[in-house]
Amino acid sequence: MRPPFDLPVILIVSDNAIKISFLKKALKEEFLLLICSSEESTLDFLHNTQIDIVLIDEKIHHIQPFDLSEKIRLLSDYPLLPVLLMTSHLKKDFTRQALHSGFTDFLNEPLDNEEIHQRLSVALAKTKADQKVQGIYSTQSGDRPIASDKKVYTYAQQPSSKSPSPSLIHSFFQDVAKAKVFPLPLCVLMIEIDHLEKIADLYGEDAIPELSQAVYLFFQRHLRKYDMLYSQRDGAFLLVLPKTSQHAGELLAKTLHEELSDQVLTIRNQQEVAITISIGLTYHEQTNLPAIGQSIAFETLVHHATRALNLARRRGNRTIVLANQQDLNTYEFDV
């Protein structure tokens, strides 16, 4: 049931009077705010009221935020509800666990009015776009989207790393429909293993496919159930992160980069190989993809991510570069 107000509804899960007061002052003119401080009342609100966004305080007493997020994701009416975590704790292990449990974005503490409005605007745009995007992607697949509890991982037939093949684009739209994923906001990552030629010289060319498979499996273990991973060729991967903001995409990219750098992968004959990766990242946070055609828009995102990857490699391996789709500027962030 929708409350009788023409305002987006935010459910704030917190027992901190100072944070609640700050959020009320910052948001009272633009949102209808509902406040609760227990898991039971949170789930009760979600069962009986149409909620647009959930904000969960990491430091709330008597609630495990990750457990609550997972329970929200199990609700049939809210598989894609934006759930944001208010936290000052954004180290890689914590961030990875939060994303895995179903959080879609973060509000950094101490809370900042400008950042709050920016993050909520992105989340709200995604919510408003869901119904429209569902129609787009169900039309692409030819069938109504169905729910899926399985990870969606598809190998493409060796497309070029510079341009996604028609089969890859088709696979993407099919995977979106099958997974019942409405992908906006959307992050796209192009990833390549560094120094493949040197690795081939040291371990032999036959080691490259095995190493690529090991990296692929590593990514699988660290991704969420609705993320989409495509192998483009040996050592190169396309990773699509649905309902992921620029900020959350950067955090996940850093986590993958750092975690893989800490790993020693085992290939044939029990040889151990330490590797690094370079990443090109782009994103789209508006309410829908450009109206020039969905497949063209997706191809454009891949092109921008590839451009960022190429720049990362020119600047030196072990690098992540983000390309802003709107102005095509790029910048490198620390890893």
Image (cartoon, rainbow, N blue to C red):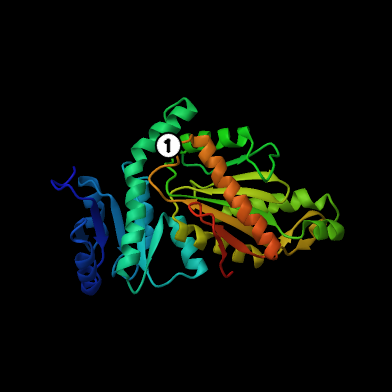
Residue 75 can be seen, yes or no = no
Circle 1 residues within 10 Å: few <14, some 14–19, many ≥20 = few
Check disc 1 and report the residue beneath it.
Answer: 147
Q: Is residue 313 left or right of residue 86?
A: right
Position of 174 compared to 66: left or right?
right
Q: What's the residue type where badge 1 is placed?
A: Ala
In which quadrant is the C terminus drawn? bottom right
- Residue 161 falls in image quadrant: top right
Q: Which residue is nearer to you in this view: 251 or 212?
A: 251
SS category of the residue bearing label 1? loop
Quarter containing the N terminus: top left
Image location of residue 102, percent across then percent down = 41, 54
Residue in the picture at 86% in, 58% down: 201
Residue 318 visible to the viewer: yes
Tell me how many marks there are.
1
Closer to us: 256 or 286: 286
* Residue furthest to the front: 327
User: Which residue is found at the position 70% from the left and 65% from the top?
Assistant: 316
The quarter of the displayed image where residue 280 is located = bottom right
Q: Residue 103, image x and y in percent?
A: 40, 57
Q: Quadrant of residue 115?
A: bottom left
Residue placed farthest to the left in the image?
4
Nearer to the camera, 256 or 46: 256
Q: 263 left or right of 333?
A: right
Residue 301 in the image, given as x and y percentages of width and height: 54, 46
